[in-house]
Amino acid sequence: MKKPFVFLSLVLFGAATLFSACSDKNTNPAKTEGDYNDSAFQSAQIYAETFVETSAETAVDGFSYLEYDFISPPKVASDSTSVIYNGSSGWWAIYFHQDDTLGNDLTYTDSVRFHGPDGYQMYPDSLTTEALEYHARLSSDLVGDTSSLIGDFWQNLDIVGIQSELVVFNGSSSADLILQNPNSHYDQDYDAALIDITFNHSDLEFEADPHPISGSLNFSMLINWQVPQGSGSNNWAVTATFYLDHYHVRFESGDYYWEWDVQYGG
């Protein structure tokens, strides 16, 4: 259930060097269409698409709590999981911690609350649960041979329409991430908004890789970096608009913008 959060963090790490290479500071509010043959943009484009798709996966991750076993929560080796219910507020708190001998440390704190026709529900019911609220936090400290990743990720989601043909997600996410290696340091802050992102209910139930059919994702990032060649910062933004068979991306960096379409399953 938690892999999308970790993968999203890794996407942001890889994107840092490429996105920051597209341009310097934003100085001109009237942006100019960028060069689609620019090698830095072409590399960044791959990460932009991966981020959009992974963001949709993290939203679906909250929906999967409809099938979570709250009585006997799943565990894996070397983890610590606790699940606590607050009867007065209706919130479940799910705490998960995992570390290993290499020094990697991951902590998830999720909260989820189910809504039925008569108010809060302790356990989700496939026939009556109408909506759920989902709050997630990931704290990571990942250490490699020559680099480290430290940071926090937050996400809040409201999911409605669970008993209808269309399920709608609204919410926000943010992160503060630091990537370091012996020669460089990247500090990234980002904010994202999920606006009326809509899935077919049947896709969420039966498709291995469901995709939105409408709605939008707005994402902005501030990157500060220090490398042997110098230091700097950059602001960039991504807007993704979802349709039945594709999504449209607008990527802005510095004084430039790029726009393109991505077909689902392409």
Image: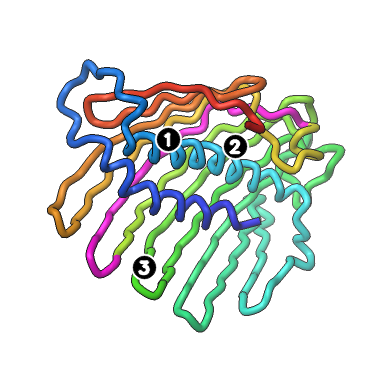
Pointer 2 local density, CA inside 10 Å: few below 14, some 14–19, many at least 20: many
Give yes or no for contact between labels 3 and 2 (Cβ–Cβ under 8 Å). Answer: no
The residue that appears at 32% across and 28% down in the rendered structure is 252
Name which residue lies at 58% across and 38% down: 56
Tell me the quarter of the image containing the C terminus: top right
The numbered mark, 3 or 2, whose residue comes first in the sequence reads 3
Picture coordinates of residue 17 (x, y %)?
31, 49
Residue carrying label 2: 158
Q: Is residue 127 left or right of residue 140?
A: right
Residue bearing the label numbered 1: 45
Q: Residue 202, relative to residue 121: is it above or below?
A: above
What amino acid does circle 3 point to? Ser
State yes or no: residue 120 in magenta.
no
Location of residue 29 (image quadrant):
top left
Rounded to the nearest angstrom, the CA distance separating label 3 from label 2 is 33 Å
Marks 3 and 1 in Cβ contact (< 8 Å): no
59 in relation to 250, above or below: below
Which of 47/122 is in front? Answer: 47
The earlier-in-sequence mark between 2 and 1 is 1
Real-space CA distance between mark 2 and mark 1, rounded to the nearest whole angstrom = 29 Å
* Residue under the image location 67 percent in, 32 percent down: 160
The quarter of the picture where residue 43 lies is top left
The span shown in magenta is 181-201
